[in-house]
Image (tube, rainbow, N blue to C red):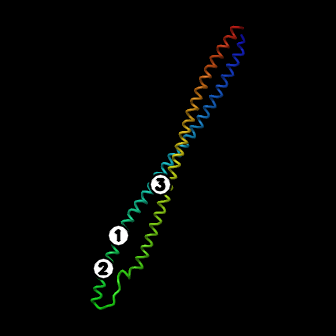
């Protein structure tokens, strides 16, 4: 029987297994490095989401408080109207030409109202932009988490492949030793 042929075949399998083990190890290292990068990106996205949601909460609180401001302005306007009515009654009794307090403050009230509406409009626009930012960040987070799962699956596959080639290497090593002894016994 030609033991040298089997010996060389076992050596070839041994070197192939060594090469494949190294390739699997390299692939595993690359994937582990990518996993660290993706995990860092996920952590940064989570921080950004937290900041964006905090800003959104602040904007919501500001808008909520502005509703109270509208109510206060209406109450002041109502009280001003009553005071104006009372003032007109007093002026009418004194015989002096009268002017309504509402008429006197109408222009400044309108300017103040426009200014307030402009500020509230800006806050609402910033809120809408913040909602879009939070939505975008959450989408990016889901994508990064999916990428992380793919990387984890790749790492498991590389480790499994490496284990397979380690077993092939061990079998080839046993065969090399067996056929080397057979060749020595035959000589």
Circles 1, 2 touching at the beta carbon (< 8 Å): no
Mark 2 Cα-neighbour bin, 10 Å: few <14, some 14–19, many ≥20:
some
Q: Give the label on residue 72, or none.
A: 1
First-in-chain label (1 vs 2): 1
* Residue at 51 percent of width and 51 percent of height: 137
Mark 3 in CB contact with mark 2 (< 8 angstroms): no
Rendered location of residue 167, percent (x, y): 59, 23
Residue at 28 percent of width and 90 percent of height: 94
Residue under label 2, please give it: 83
Which residue is identified by label 3?
A: 52
Say which element carries label 3. Answer: helix
Q: Which picture quadrant has residue 59?
A: bottom left
Q: Position of residue 85 (x, y in %)?
A: 30, 81
Q: Alpha-carbon distance for marks 3 and 1?
A: 30 Å
- Label pair 3/1, CB-CB below 8 angstroms: no
Quadrant location of the N terminus in the rendered image: top right
Closer mark to the observer between disc 3 and disc 2: 2
Give me the disc on residue 113.
none
Task: Mark 1: give few (<14), some (14-19) or many (20+) Cα within 10 Å.
Answer: few
Query: Disc 3 and disc 2: Cα gap in Å?
Result: 46 Å
Give the residue displayed 48% in from the left and 57% down from the top. Answer: 130
């Amino acid at each position: 029987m030609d033991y040298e042929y089997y010996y060389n075949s076992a050596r070839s399998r041994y070197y192939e297994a060594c090469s494949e083990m190294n390739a699997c190890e390299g692939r595993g290292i690359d994937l582990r490095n990518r996993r660290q990068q993706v995990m860092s990106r996920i952590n940064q996205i989570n921080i950004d989401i937290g900041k964006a949601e905090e800003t959104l909460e602040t904007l919501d609180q500001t808008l909520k408080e502005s509703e109270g401001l509208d109510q206060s302005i209406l109450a002041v306007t109502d009280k001003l109207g009553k005071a104006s009515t009372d003032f007109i009654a007093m002026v009418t009794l004194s015989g002096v030409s009268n002017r309504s307090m509402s008429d006197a403050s109408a222009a400044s009230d309108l300017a103040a109202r426009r200014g307030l509406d402009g500020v509230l409009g800006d806050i609402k626009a910033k809120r809408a932009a913040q909602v879009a930012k939070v939505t975008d960040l959450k989408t990016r987070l889901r994508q990064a988490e999916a990428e992380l799962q793919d990387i984890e699956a790749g790492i498991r596959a590389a480790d499994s492949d490496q284990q397979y080639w380690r077993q092939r290497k061990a079998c080839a090593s046993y065969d090399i030793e067996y056929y080397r002894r057979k060749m020595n016994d035959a000589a």
